[in-house]
Amino acid sequence: MTSGDATPMRIWALRAAFLAVALAAWEAISASGLLFRDVVPSLVAIGAALARVLGTPDFYANLAVTAQEIGAAVVIGGLCGLATGILLGSNRFLSQAFESLLLYLGPTPKIIFFPVMIMWFGVGPGSKIAMGVASCFFPIAISTAAGMRQIDAVLIRVGRSFRASPWQMIRCIYLPAMREPIVTGLRLGLGVAIIGTLLAETKLSNKGLGYLVIQAYALFDMPRMYALLILLFVLSIGLNALLGRFSRVTRGIST
Amino acid sequence: MAEALLDVRNITKRFATSDGGILAVDDVSFSVAPGEFVSIIGPSGCGKSTLFNIIGGLTGDYEGHVAVEGATVVGTHPAIGMVFQEESTFPWRTVEENVAFPLEIGGMVRAARMERAAHFIALVGLTGFERRYPAELSGGMRQRVAIARTLASEPRILLMDEPFAALDEQTRLLLGDKVLQIQQTLKQTTLLITHNLTEAVQLSDRVLVMTYRPGRLKRSVTIDLPHPRDSEVVSSEAFGHYVAQIWQDLREEASRGIEDAESRVRLRGARR
Amino acid sequence: MTVRALARTRNGARAFGIATTVAAIAVVEGLIRGGAINAYIVPLPTQILAALPRIIAEEHVLQRFWQTAQEVLWASLLLAAFGIALGALLYRFRLLRQAFEAWVGALAAAPIVLMYPLFLVIFGRSTTTIVMIGFAAGLAPVILKTAEGLSGTRKVLIDVGRSFKLSPAQQFRKVLLPAALPSVFVGLRLGLIFAMINIVGVEFLINFGGLGQLINELAERYDLPGTYGAILFVILASVTFFDLTARIERWLRPVE
């Protein structure tokens, strides 16, 4: 068992070594032709495809479409989730009546609702946004409801003693006290909204990042597919990390 | 004088910290004769838990030595059985599986070790609870399981670190009684670390008083009271006399501890 | 019991919940019949219910359910084997954990299922693709929870092991592993749920497999009541799965 903390140097050295070995192995498999030629394209090809993707405005147009869809989904799903969470979290009766519905419907594969969404909202961005909303509503609602119940009861009593209106309670007491669970719920919600929206785009769309990926698949342009997937992963992991940093900042501000 | 079973010589322990270093234990020496019940008492921060870990072999890197029957001991030793302050029963094992644990390690077959474990379970008064899980028991019962488990390894020396600290007063008194009974029956050499005055006087043949940090042995008090140490003995004048005597020493050290803590808080505030 | 007293009990609340849901469905039925909602977009709830026995009989729902279940089973075996092993590795070698735990955490947040076109190319349109996606999607939580469980063992329990002079192997087998088991099961359950969700999702997307494919097929046939009905089945299956895994997890953790 190694004792003591490893220095940052050793950590980064190990990470670099891991990456180096992984990339080298990749290149070796690619060159050897062990697997079907194009399944493992050389790193050079992937790099070139990456450059091409980032170089054309087409990518950014599609990125914008997807971003807008996800943004709309998170806003709508977030507001609905927050409202539902606050309602259920503040009222024990309603919580016992309906919260199990949320908990059970939450872990279901939302993409199966897509045909229904298409029927309701058409084949355009509407159905993709609806997918995103369906995906992110649940984690945000569940997290908010739990957060409501964890609010220090005395803070609520303070609000009531000053005869705050329901809206004032929400604005001045509930929301500030729940900063952390809300951000946690948002992080989760954003993650699943991205997945839901993009999967919907791969299924039926002519715009967006998901569409680009499935198009690359259909054209069997493997380097391009890898490039797009890499970009997608970098963006979503980056967003998640940013939200994580933001949540740490808010944790520092709140009492 | 009987030859010492446990001999602790010139134990000194330093801890390196960000602001210099702490001398936790300073040149502590004492010995425990076979069958003796010795308590070490001291205020919080006197290093008694450090001493416990050193004698038990869980902490290394100290000066001085620990010897069992004349032979120096380094690291944990089967002759020294440890009972910890915190919850230490294995939550995933039943009572009998917990108690049989040292026997299992020793390679005894299942039937034999369960039978042997039953003996020690009976000793601590938990017959009937063999198949229960620790979560089903009270805190006091769980500590009894921990004690039975350590006794099952039949150590030459039983080393206990404030085993009753987490229990309420009544449970603590009853358990203390039980442990003393067992000790007298088995003639178990016992070293008890405690901060509880009455407990120390009630259970021990000798009480060693430690100073506040750095921990040194301030005084050794021989408790010359009859066994069994029942309620009559506990309420006797002689008992009270011992308690008062030890409290004199302890009080000094305890106030030093409080002053020290206060001054540290003041310093921290001033630095801000 | 008065209505008010009944309302205060937990079962009263649950009954209220169920009642309002049924009432809402009845309202929808009324609105569709009345023409306020287009029957071509939202079929009559009664029609959906009527479609259920038809789907069971004609579409071999049980077989498809079993197909999906097998995929989940394979994924769980892979998850248990690789996830726990990798988690134990991360625990055993502190340097590995410090270097890579954050990466595994990032993986947990990544949209792994979006790689399904890639898996399609590598494994073809087959069960293997579906199982691999399930495995990939559920791996991160198993690894993280295993490592967390092992390193979260209470120090006093490790000290007990040391006081009995256990060898490192004995410590691992008799103290660390049992102490970590509750966490490991939590991780496995999370991983399984992620796997199940993604497996059904991918079945739908690539039109292959069990229940997910059924929905896709019925949708492409424009069989609306059938589609809704099949979705209901999947919800039922996932709820059952969620509940079942919760029970198993509780049962496997004797008392903690």
Image (spheres, grey):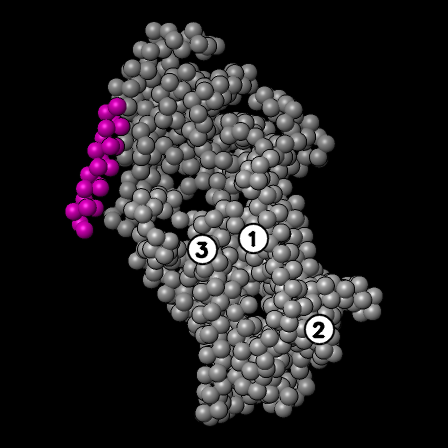
Task: Tell me the residue at 80%/66% (across/down).
Answer: C54
Q: Amino acid at mark 2?
A: Leu
* Kind of element beneath mark 2: helix
Q: Which residue is mark 1?
A: A98
Q: Amino acid at mark 3?
A: Ile
Q: Nearer the viewer, residue B31 or C110?
A: C110
- The chain identifier of the residue carrying mark 2 reads C
Part of the protein shown in magenta? B251-272
Task: Tell me the residue at 28%/51% (across/down).
Answer: B18
Q: Residues within 10 Å of mark 1 (few under 14, many from 20)?
A: some
Cα–Cα gap, marks 1 and 3: 13 Å
Q: Residues within 10 Å of mark 3 (few under 14, many from 20)?
A: many
Would you say the residues marked 1 and 3 are in contact, meaning their CB atoms lie under 8 Å apart?
A: no
Q: Which residue is mark 3?
A: A86
Q: Which residue is mark 2?
A: C224
Q: Quadrant of residue C198?
A: bottom right
